[in-house]
Image (cartoon, coloured by chain):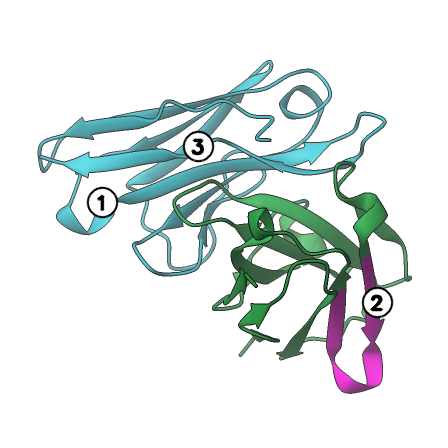
Amino acid sequence: QSVLTQPPSVSAAPGQKVTISCSGSSSNIGNNYVSWYQQLPGTAPKLLIYDNNKRPSGIPDRFSGSKSGTSATLGITGLQTGDEADYYCGTWDSSLSAGSVFGTGTKVTVL
Amino acid sequence: QVTLKESGPALVKPTQTLTLTCTFSGFSLSTSAMRVSWIRQPPGKALEWLARIDWDDDKFYSTSLKTRLTISKDTSKNQVVLTMTNMDPVDTATYYCARMPMTTSDAFDIWGQGTMVTVSS
């Protein structure tokens, strides 16, 4: 039932960079802010990015967000083993079925 | 410190009604622009937003589950309650509540630890 599309998985070696895409439409990403969440195994999601590119206090600048049109991207630089987790994008959908929506999720593997 | 904690039955039978309570501290749901949502995650699957209640008692529901959900708040107790009727095994999931303050627009800045609900006879 996910409205936003993400790649199922991405991987890279420690120290490298990965990017995760999130594709939506004009009713969601195109006209609303995007947020990103990290979910470590067995834990609740944690907010990484809000308002497309802002980081909450305590989130390192290795994590960055951007948005263009109806797509958004999360970037992780200086990849660490502790970054191995599932990542989800989220936004509000302003269509007739208004509500929050999430992406399909992306598993990041550190090789 | 802002915290949220979900509580409710770990096991429900098919067709029963599920009632979950989110008890929070460190903020007030009577504060302007404060909101609390419920989100669930079936085992091994993606997050699914369920419902939201706002400081002014505005309510929003997932279109696909709208007929089965009711969200309410008790500001004096710092609680948000979600009821889901006619439970089915496909509703087996971890259920989270999360805060949405105005400062993070439509983002969920603090999440509860989640409560696992299994639907089985």
User: Please, which chain is the residue tagged with disc 1 on?
Assistant: A
Residue A17 shows up from this direction: no
Q: Residue at x 81, y 31 (%)?
A: A97
Q: CA distance from mark 3 to mark 1?
A: 18 Å
Q: Which chain is in cyan here?
A: A
User: For the view shown, which residue lies furthest in the bottom direction?
Assistant: B77
Q: Earlier in the sequence, mark 3 or mark 1?
A: 3
Residue B40 shows up from this direction: yes
Residue B16 location, quadrant: bottom right
Residue A21 location, quadrant: top left
Do marks 3 and 1 share a subunit? yes
Task: Give left or right: position of B96 versus A30.
Answer: left
**Which of B3 and B50 lies nearest the eye of the viewer?**
B50
Instruction: Identify the residue position indicated by label 1 in the image.
Output: A84
Give neighbour class at mark 1: few <14, some 14-19, many 20+ (Cα, 10 Å): some
Q: Residue at x 23, y 46 (%)?
A: A83
Instruction: Identify the residue position indicated by label 3 in the image.
Output: A65
- What color is chain B drawn in? green
Say if B105 sits above or below B121 in the image.
Answer: above
Q: Residue B73 magenta-drawn?
A: yes
Residues drawn in magenta = B70-82
Where is residue B36 shown, x and y percent of the image? 71, 61
**Which of A26 and B67 lies nearest the eye of the viewer?**
B67
Task: Give left or right: position of A60 versus B92.
Answer: left
Say if A7 sits above or below B58 in the image.
Answer: above
Say if B36 sits above or below A5 in the image.
Answer: below
Residue A102 location, quadrant: top right
Where is residue A61 shown, x and y percent of the image? 32, 44
Q: From the image, give the main secondary structure of the stretch colored magenta.
A: strand
Mark 3: which secondary structure?
A: strand
Of tags 2 and 1, which is closer to the observer? 2
